[in-house]
Amino acid sequence: MDTEIIEKLIAKNEKKIIFLIMDGLGGLPKEPGGKTELETAMTPNLDRLAAQGSTGLLDPVGIGITPGSGPAHFALFGYDPVKYNVGRGLLSAAGLNFELTPGDLYMRANFATLDKFGHIADRRAGRLETDKNKLLCIKLKANVRLQNAKEVFFVTEKEHRALVVLRGGNFSEQVSETDPQKTGVEPIEAQALAPEADDTAAAIRELSGQVKNVLRQEQQANALLLRGYSGYHEFPSFSGRFGLKPLAIASYPMYKGVARLLKMTLAEETNTIEEEIQQLASGYGKYNFFYVHIKATDSRGEDGNFEEKIKVIERVDSLLPEILSLNPDVLVVTGDHSTPAVMASHSFHPVPVLLWAKNCRADSTSNFGETACLSGSLGRMPMKKLMAIALAHAGKLQKFGA
């Protein structure tokens, strides 16, 4: 449905909507005919909600398309993921509350390990400790100087992730990324993808070379892989579009970045799932839309750890009674994309979704899993339409026409 129609039908009320997002929720079985991580997990609370609610499958961007976390999250919040797609660097910068300045170029960076041949041995430098990341960023900030940029910023995000910002130059987003997103090969040399990007590509090549030189004595993190280039972009506010008072609860900066760009209120800093649920309870009286982001499902999927991803799902399930005790009018449980542990990466597979509301139509689904959701009453639909369904179940959409 056209989102412009939805915005014209908004009816404000104080009914509460919770989006519980288990990042990378969708999975695959270890063996053909087996069960996925979600299907293997013991989830009595999710299964009970599935039996009472409506289920289905979501395509974040389009059928067969593997989504990044940025466009997938925009789709979750009812934004066209293609129209509003931006490089992940901007999302990280916003999440870190870095001063956003027109003309800057923001880049997502991974500290990585190169072997003696210059090949990537580990794209995440063993999931580098955050404190070590901070020391390396200080070291790089003190020693890297570029000809085509007045300033270069290195900012710790979390674990192996960092933000790199170029300021004071004529920068373009149209440059190839240096991260091949696989091991056993050399980092890619940045190349201009448009004539106006020649100087930017040269600056990034110079940057990569200087970083390797500064980090040459490091055993674990001796290179940076760059991707997600973006300048500054403005977005229509979530509250303005849907008449909601949103609270975003997330531990990772990038997801805070999406929320900040959409002008959501951010909850206080959290480090555990339990703390996120506490923040949900603390803010429940002040807001009527809640975005709760669980990162660990995606991290364990990317690690290729099937069993640990199961444990995270079970942990979330055990906390559902605390969420339900708040008496939400609508509860949506889903992921932004699939991250099967057997692939150790994002995938194109649709994401299971569960919607529970006091006025929803229960379908024949008796448990929450990928196979069961195939026959759910929500069907298979674009993720960007989920927001309209949640609004409707909360009585926040007026009748269309006479």
Image (cartoon, grey):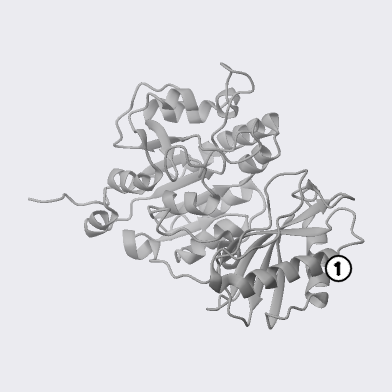
Q: Where's residue 182, x and y in %?
A: 70, 44
Q: Where's residue 238, x and y in %?
A: 39, 61
- Residue 96 shows in this picture: no
Q: Where's residue 315, x and y in %?
A: 62, 35
Residue 62 sits in quarter: top left
- Local packing at callout 1 (Cα closer than 10 Å; few below 14, some 14-19, many 20+) is some
Residue at the limit of the structure toward the right, as seen here = 217
Q: Find numbered disc 1 in the image and state the secondary structure of the residue it sits on.
A: helix
Badge 1 amino acid: Val
**212 versus 352 height, above or below:** below
Q: Where's residue 291, x and y in %?
A: 48, 52
Residue positioned 67% across, 62% down in the render: 190
**152 versus 62 height, above or below:** below
Residue 213 sits in quarter: bottom right
Foreground pick, 14 / 305: 305
Residue at the limit of the structure toward the front, as seen here = 195
Foreground pick, 331 / 58: 58
**Residue bearing mark 1:** 214
Residue positioned 78% across, 46% down in the render: 122
